[in-house]
Amino acid sequence: MKWFKRLIISVLILLFFCILLYKPDGINLEGNWEAKEIVLDNKKIYPDLLATIIDFPPQIIINGWTKSITIPVERNNISASLQYVESIKGNYKIKLSSSEKSLNGTFDLIVDTLDIGPQAYIVNVKLKSNKTLIHFQRTVIIPPWKPPFPKRGQV
């Protein structure tokens, strides 16, 4: 019975260190993004004439649980499932599959980060293939680190 307890404790300690030291490879694009440019099959969808009048860009939504991307196109939402393909020397690729013909295939993923302040960044992402371009961005503000409030009896 002692060996069983030791085995369980050893496995739990090993599992704890694996979780502690695990660093995922790749890029996480999950969340809501602001569309900058949408070109499908060499046809410019956004920005259009209405976008010059109204300064309210459409939202591109990337869902990490279902691994899907939702792109607004002319009052409709086109959904595509995405799969991250292995990176080769820092060049990331994403494979999309959708009912929309122009969203099927492998896309180059170009990520550019712009520093706009001490703790603020603009992250630009482009999904690019031969005839299709999806450009979106998001502003990321990292709050400053605050030390925990001292408890009574601490120095």
Image (cartoon, grey):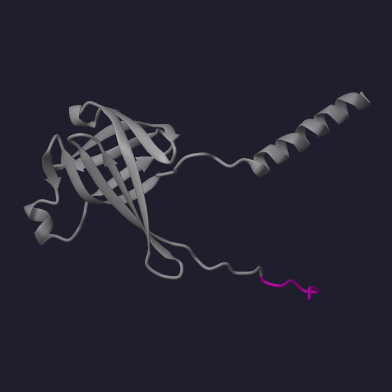
Quadrant in the picture for the N terminus: top right
**Picture coordinates of residue 73, whole percent (x, y):** 17, 41
**Picture coordinates of residue 137, whole percent (x, y):** 31, 53
> For the image shown, how many numbered marks are present on the structure?
0
Q: Is residue 70 left or right of residue 114?
A: left
Most extreme residue toward the bottom is 155
Residue 13: which quarter of the image?
Answer: top right
Q: Residue at x 39, y 34 (%)?
A: 67
Most extreme residue toward the left is 49
**Picture coordinates of residue 38, whole percent (x, y):** 19, 44
Reply above or below: 140 against 117: above
On whether residue 151 falls in the magenta region, the answer is: yes
On whether residue 107 falls in the magenta region, the answer is: no
Reply above or below: 117 against 130: below
Reply above or below: 43 against 120: above
Q: In this view, does 85 lie to the left or right of 18?
A: left
Q: Residue at x 41, y 65 (%)?
A: 120
Q: What stretch is highlighted in magenta?
A: 149-155
Most extreme residue toward the right is 2
Q: Is residue 49 left or right of residue 72?
A: left
Quadrant in the picture for the C terminus: bottom right
Q: Residue at x 20, y 49 (%)?
A: 37
Q: Which residue is drawn at 30% across and 34% down?
A: 107
**Picture coordinates of residue 130, whole percent (x, y):** 20, 34
Main SS, magenta residues? loop
